[in-house]
Amino acid sequence: MFFCKYDVRLQWNPREKLSKNNVMTQNKANKMWGGRFSEKPSDIMEQINASIDVDVRLWRQDIAGSKAHCEMLVKRNIIPAEDGAAILKGLDQIAGEIEAGEFEFKRSLEDIHMNIESRLREIIGDVAGRLHTARSRNDQVATDFRLWCRDAICELVAKIEGLQNVLENLRQKHVGDIMPGFTHLQPAQPVTLGIHLDAYAQMLSRDKTRLEDCSIRLNQCPLGAAAMAGTPFPIDREMTAKALGFDNPIPNTMDAVSDRDFVAEFLFCCALCGIHLSRLAEEIIIWSTPQFGFITLSDQWSTGSSIMPQKKNPDAAELVRGKTGRLNGNVVQVLTMLKGLPLTYNKDLQEDKEFVFDSVDTISLCLEAMSGMLSSATFHSARMLETAEDGYTTATALADWLVMNLGMPFRDAHHVTGAIVKMAEDKGCKLDALDLADMQGVESRITDEIYKVLSVKK
Ligand code: ARG
């Protein structure tokens, strides 16, 4: 027997999430395959099996897929036209009910597919059962999910473009603003803020094309694969694929129901984009410290401290950085879930959607937060210039001058420059404040032309 040793115990309800929403449970054997079963599933079985809390987000895609499938069944004389018409009308009614928040989702019906089909039966009667001719939930869910990811990619691409615009505006505004460029976070060489920000725009343009590429590869239609081996009905896979905007049906039906490469790929695209945003977030965090003082975030994008009145914290940037953990984790979740799965469909595959939804929500929020933070931030160009002048950032330019003008091998020029930097350090002055005679003491052939490369502006 385990005794809690703490006096204070708060109520802890592990089923809280499940009991709070309006998902209903039902005390009967499953309606969809009740014929084979005499007992209802155990409550825990229902909980582990049900995905409706998550895949409810696929309802639009599920209805679109069902409509395309139904139209094809009618066209190919697999179901009577009047039944097809009733099914289409019923599906439209269901769409209206879900949209209006009037649809009662039931956990006993497992997932979005069966919730919709069951409601269809309530509305139009037994002809609803004809919709599932020549189809399985296996090709159905794969189709719905590809459609969802395709739309999500369009949304994300638009958000990436939004951030690219913010960066492009900043690039133009700060095209000539000098700042220190860093390696190892040590002042390295002078650059401009425009170029620095443009480097992030370049990363985003790769993120964008990577997503677009993922979308091209996923745009193939699983419908018609049925459970996995196709169907004896004279279906028209080209027709359903075309109606749903897919490029073509997936040729191998076993691959069609079990492939989740697009999920792993999409999650990776989100994760890498998140990594890029977190690198930029890290810059914002560093730049907004009083020690750097390169940037001030607007009040809208800052938070205060509950104890230290002077604080203005870059929480949004820190959260963008912190959220990469979940983006990376989602990739690992799906790869691990897929590892070792034999062909074809296995219920493990149900553990894919939650992570894609989470990654899409997360990266979308991060892209918006970044756009908001950067477009309202103030960059302190004078402070950047001042720091660019510290730290001997023109030393490489000095070495290059020695090579170009005196014909010195670069390694020798590097050595001479090191000695000159040391001299400036000892004198506590900048490179362009050194006397020519002092520099000539290190290398006699240096002329006053050298001053041209010693200022960061040059
Ligand atoms: N909810 C299921 C999923 O997301 C749908 C497919 C169910 N297929 C099956 N054979 N049980 O994967």
Image: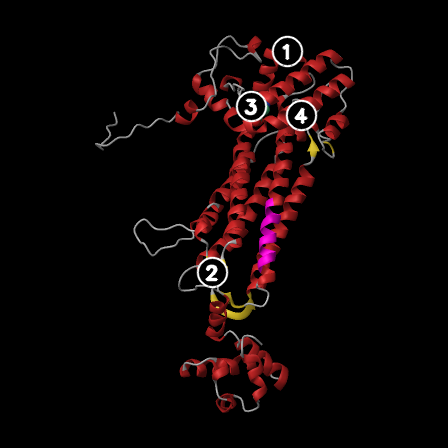
User: Percent x, y for residue 301?
Assistant: 45, 50
Residue 124: which disc? Answer: 1
Q: Is residue 106 left or right of residue 164?
A: left
Foreground label between 3 and 2? 3
State which quarter of the image contains the C terminus: bottom right
User: What amino acid is at disc 4?
Assistant: Gly
Q: Residue at x 45, y 24 (%)?
A: 21
Foreground label between 4 and 1? 1
Residue 161: which disc? Answer: none
Foreground label between 1 and 3? 3
Residue 295: which disc? Answer: 2
First in residue order: circle 2 vs circle 1: 1
User: Percent x, y for residue 281?
Assistant: 49, 53
First in residue order: circle 4 vs circle 2: 4
User: What amino acid is at disc 2?
Assistant: Ile
Residue 65: which disc? Answer: 4
Looking at the rendered structure, the secondary structure element under dot 3 is: loop
Residue range highlighted in magenta: 159-170
Distance from Cα at disc 3 to Cα at disc 2? 45 Å
First in residue order: circle 4 vs circle 3: 4
| Residue nearest the viewer, comparing 436 with 402 | 436
